[in-house]
């Protein structure tokens, strides 16, 4: 036994020495001066593997006709760590991006597996985590080698029904790299599809893996793979962790530097001025010449359609900003009362208030309503694709005076691409259409928020995403800020719940999956990734009571194509008076209760927004430490 151990140590020393030589060669080729070329503060990746053997976790082994090996492993990471890993992939604001190529934006399409939603993670942080080191050791044990493999690319991905994924290879054969895909959904139906397939040299499938929580499939990176999207009947998103391993340590550091640069740029743009800020607003607007149509419901509620209110440069910049820096949130929970939009990007109210876009939007609202009191409390962009299933909804309650303004941001949608917004007389099965509006680039629609409406997905021949930029306006700043505070607080509460997840893992407790009572556009981790109902909820009988055609259905209202929060006067006193177990939540709620002036309400809302962003980063960092 000692002899075997001695041989292993010798092999390990040789491997580490060879690794250092490989790193020096790679660094020289990349124009780097040394292993510390990324700066003095560069974090170090551990180069000693974990003292565990994961060979017994190999469930299946596959071999190509050319002798290339692939593996399926189960139970490499325990359930608690998997729970934290899921939270880690979802916690950072703005990290998820819609990655499909948009020809309108210019540039060249990069080869990829065409999974639309990607979150690039820090290779160094992941490499030093317990989860990362276990997966690293799984690679070494599956290959039967003492050589170290380091994560040089780490991505979380979400794949949904209707996605058009492509056969792809992660690296060249001479790179000698390995790729790994891990399934991160708790439960998966046997008819839900979502498998990973590997292809042989003759382009035949030689291996595959069905989705199981924590299951890993490992293959040489030069072998083509295909992620099979979920079935059309499956409404849930499939969460995957995609890791690429290299024997060259320097590649992991390069990944880290690239991640830092992109992250810094993203944060600067999220916190910086909104698009068109500083650009002079038009001195006058001839609304009559720009009005395309005007509609009115049987109850006298109004809809106006305008073209050419915004110039093309502003529209192009807004579209580019949304695609590159939008803070997207994913929610695939099943809620019959919401608009059912899965991906929504939120934007900072105070930054938006200083922009040319708000100046023009406010003037539009003043023109159609005869009042200039309006305040924007919800600024968002909805991203809808052809397999989405949107629903009819209201943007406010029946007794509220609100307007919703939207701008269509697809420059290439044609008459057969669908994507219209439909307005209805009632939110019931027995309803009639008031108007249908086509999504022309830059077209603006402003309507009273109580009108039931639905954003329709594009057609199957439109592979890109339908974008609509939305501004919801309330009667004044105090009401608007209060509504924005309550909506933000729901999401902040979800973040605080994740802190309890970390504390529970410290204490060795099982992490429970909690379902939130009300859907929110800023979903918690459970809402973003699970969407599963509890067994008790699933067994509850549905309410088959017919809709009341004479009264609008206002429960769970959404924003224009996005969910809404009830205004302060509609919240029950009992709900407002309920204290949380979290002192930070109680402190902020008490500040809002005591706020008397618009300045005080504004200050407490801004404080909550700041704390929300800060605490997300705190929790993300905490998750990384407990992985």
Image (cartoon, grey):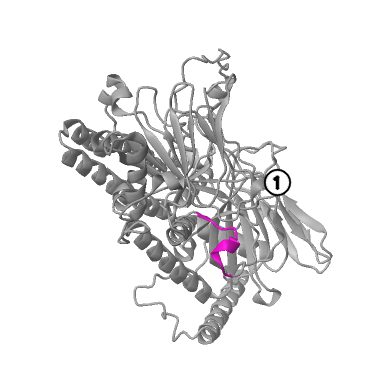
Relative horizontal placement of residue 412, taking residue 303 as reference (left or right): right
SS under mark 1 = loop
Relative horizontal placement of residue 503, taking residue 86 as reference (left or right): left
Q: Residue visible at 34% across and 77% down?
A: 40
Place of residue 502 in the rendered image (x, y in percent of width and height, measured from the top left): 39, 44
Residue 575 placement: quadrant: top left
Place of residue 104 in the rendered image (x, y in percent of width and height, measured from the top left): 57, 62
Q: Residues within 10 Å of mark 1 (few under 14, many from 20)?
A: some
Q: Residue visible at 56% across and 67% down?
A: 106
Q: Nearer the viewer, residue 392 or 328?
A: 392
In magenta segment, residue 171 = no
- Whether 11 is drawn above or below 622: the answer is below
Q: Can residue 461 be seen in this view?
A: yes
Q: Residue visible at 36% across and 46% down?
A: 361
Q: Mark 1 points at which residue?
A: 210
Q: Can residue 45 be seen in this view?
A: no
Q: Nearer the viewer, residue 543 or 457?
A: 457
Place of residue 182 in the rendered image (x, y in percent of width and height, measured from the top left): 60, 52
Residue 398 placement: quadrant: top left
In magenta segment, residue 106 = yes
Q: What stretch is highlighted in magenta?
A: 97-107
- Whether 529 is drawn above or below 49: the answer is above
- Whether 435 is drawn above or below 261: the answer is above
Residue 160 placement: quadrant: top right
Place of residue 376 in the rendered image (x, y in percent of width and height, measured from the top left): 33, 41
């Amino acid at each position: 036994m000692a002899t075997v151990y001695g041989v292993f140590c010798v092999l390990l020393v040789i491997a580490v020495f060879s690794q250092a030589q490989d790193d020096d060669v790679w660094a020289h080729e990349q124009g780097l001066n040394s292993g510390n070329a990324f700066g003095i503060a560069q974090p170090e990746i551990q180069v000693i593997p974990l003292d565990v053997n994961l060979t017994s976790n190999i469930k299946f082994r596959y071999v190509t006709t050319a002798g290339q090996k692939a593996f399926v492993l189960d139970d490499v990471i325990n359930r608690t760590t998997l729970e934290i890993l899921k939270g880690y992939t979802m916690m950072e604001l703005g990290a998820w991006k819609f990655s499909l190529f948009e020809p309108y934006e210019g540039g060249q399409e990069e080869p990829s597996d065409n999974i639309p939603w990607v979150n690039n993670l820090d290779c160094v942080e992941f490499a030093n985590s317990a989860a990362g080191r276990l997966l690293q050791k799984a690679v070494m044990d599956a290959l039967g080698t003492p050589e170290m493999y380091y994560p040089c690319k780490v991505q979380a991905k979400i794949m949904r029904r209707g996605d058009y994924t492509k056969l792809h290879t992660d690296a060249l054969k001479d790179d000698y790299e390995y790729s790994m895909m891990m399934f991160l959904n708790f439960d998966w139906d046997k008819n839900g599809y979502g498998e990973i397939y590997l292809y042989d040299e003759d382009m035949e499938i030689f291996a595959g893996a069905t989705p199981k929580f924590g299951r890993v499939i490992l293959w040489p990176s030069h072998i083509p793979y295909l992620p099979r999207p979920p079935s059309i009947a499956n409404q849930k998103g499939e969460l995957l962790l995609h890791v690429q391993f290299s024997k060259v340590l320097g590649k992991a550091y390069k990944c880290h530097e690239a991640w830092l640069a992109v992250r810094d740029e993203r944060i600067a743009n999220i916190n910086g001025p909104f698009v068109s800020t500083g650009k002079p607003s038009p001195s006058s607007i001839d609304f009559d010449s720009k009005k395309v149509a005007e509609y009115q419901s049987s109850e006298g509620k109004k809809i106006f359609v305008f073209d050419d209110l915004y110039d093309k440069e502003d529209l192009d910049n807004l579209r580019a900003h949304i695609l590159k820096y939008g803070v997207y949130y994913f929610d695939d929970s099943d809620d019959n009362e919401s608009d059912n939009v899965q991906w929504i990007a939120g934007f900072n109210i105070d930054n938006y208030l200083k922009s040319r876009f708000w100046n023009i939007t406010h003037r539009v609202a003043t023109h159609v309503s005869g009042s200039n009191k309006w305040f924007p409390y919800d600024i968002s962009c909805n991203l809808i694709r052809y397999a989405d299933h949107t629903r009819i909804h209201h943007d406010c309650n029946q007794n509220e005076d609100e307007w919703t303004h939207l701008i269509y941001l697809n420059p290439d949608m044609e008459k057969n691409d669908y994507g219209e917004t439909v307005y209805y007389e009632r939110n019931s099965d027995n309803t009639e259409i008031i108007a249908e509006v086509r999504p022309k680039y830059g077209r603006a629609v402003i309507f009273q928020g109580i009108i039931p409406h639905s954003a329709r997905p594009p057609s199957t021949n439109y592979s890109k995403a339908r974008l609509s930029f939305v501004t919801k306006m309330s009667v004044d700043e105090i009401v608007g800020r209060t509504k924005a505070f309550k909506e933000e607080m729901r999401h902040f509460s979800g973040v605080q719940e994740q802190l309890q997840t970390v504390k529970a893992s410290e204490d060795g407790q099982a992490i429970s999956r909690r379902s939130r009572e009300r859907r929110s556009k800023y979903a918690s981790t459970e809402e973003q990734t699970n969407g599963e109902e509890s067994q008790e909820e699933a067994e509850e009988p549905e309410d088959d009571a017919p809709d009341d055609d004479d009264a609008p259905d206002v429960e769970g209202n959404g924003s224009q194509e996005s969910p809404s929060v009830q205004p302060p006067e509609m919240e029950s006193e009992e709900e407002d008076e309920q204290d949380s177990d979290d002192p930070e939540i109680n402190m902020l709620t008490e500040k809002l209760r005591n706020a008397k002036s618009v300045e005080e309400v504004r200050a407490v809302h801004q404080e909550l927004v700041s704390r929300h962003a800060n605490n997300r980063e705190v929790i993300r960092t905490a998750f990384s430490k407990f992985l």
